[in-house]
Image: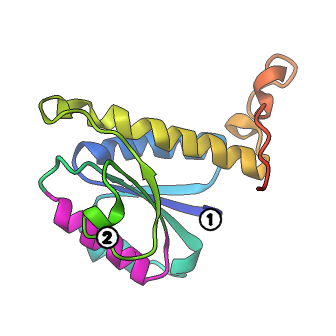
Amino acid sequence: MDKKYVEIVGDGPLFWAGKFIQAKVVELSGDACSVIDSENYKHVNVMMEPAEEIGEIVLINTNDCNLKHIADTVNLMAAKNRDVFLLCDKRPEEIGVHGKVKYCPMPVPEKKYNFLASLYAYLPGAIFAGFRHTTIGEPMFRGGMDPTIFIPTYYSPIDVVDM
């Protein structure tokens, strides 16, 4: 996802996981990043333009009771030509998502341990933030670290190659 504006959509506890992912995106890449739940997205953020310049990261746990609603929200995003990165424990077609999305499998805990779902969602989001900072060549923490002290970690040690 190569967008300068990133929006994270999650419901319930995944909304709060989105807040932590937002902090990582801002700290590492400096991209503008917001967090919203699917209901408010449908009422407000669906109108943000230009839609093709906004990247969406959607966190879905199929153990949650609002699965149909958030799947409809993802279909709406795709219909508006937004670049959607879906983090979910089931494939898009299994949950009723028919629009074009990028899919990343995200394991979720057993239903009785659903309180841990936020931790499961945070990890791929944090990895995305690190990948984004690496691909644009942004120094970690927006260059706020003293490179004479933190030389090994100032720039990402990961090389990104096109295949």
**Toward the viewer: 60 or 98?**
98
The image shows residue 49, relative to residue 140, as above or below, that is: below
Residue bounds of the magenta highlight = 66-83
**Left or right: where 72 falls relative to 3:** left
Measured in 3D between alpha carbons, the distance from the residue under mark 2 to the one under mark 1, in whole angstroms, is 22 Å
| Label annotation for residue 97 | 2
Which x, y percent locates residue 153? 76, 25
Q: Amino acid at mark 1?
A: Lys
Mark 2 or mark 1, which is nearer to you? Answer: 2
Location of the N terminus (image quadrant): bottom right
Which x, y percent locates residue 58? 39, 57
> Do we see residue 11 in this rendering?
yes
Q: State yes or no: residue 72 in magenta.
A: yes
Q: Badge 2 local density, few (<14 within 10 Å), some, or many (20+)?
A: many
**Toward the viewer: 24 or 82?**
82
**Left or right: where 121 falls relative to 50:** left
The image shows residue 83, relative to residue 136, as above or below, that is: below
Label 2: element kind: loop
Residue at 36% x, 35% y is 120
| Label annotation for residue 44 | none
Q: Badge 1 local density, few (<14 within 10 Å), some, or many (20+)?
A: some
Q: Quadrant of residue 27?
A: top right
Q: Amino acid at mark 2?
A: Val
Residue at 80% x, 24% y is 146
The image shows residue 152, relative to residue 116, as above or below, that is: above
Give the prevailing secondary structure in the magenta stretch.
helix
Q: Which residue is mark 1?
A: 3
> Do we see residue 29 in this rendering?
no
Label 1: element kind: loop
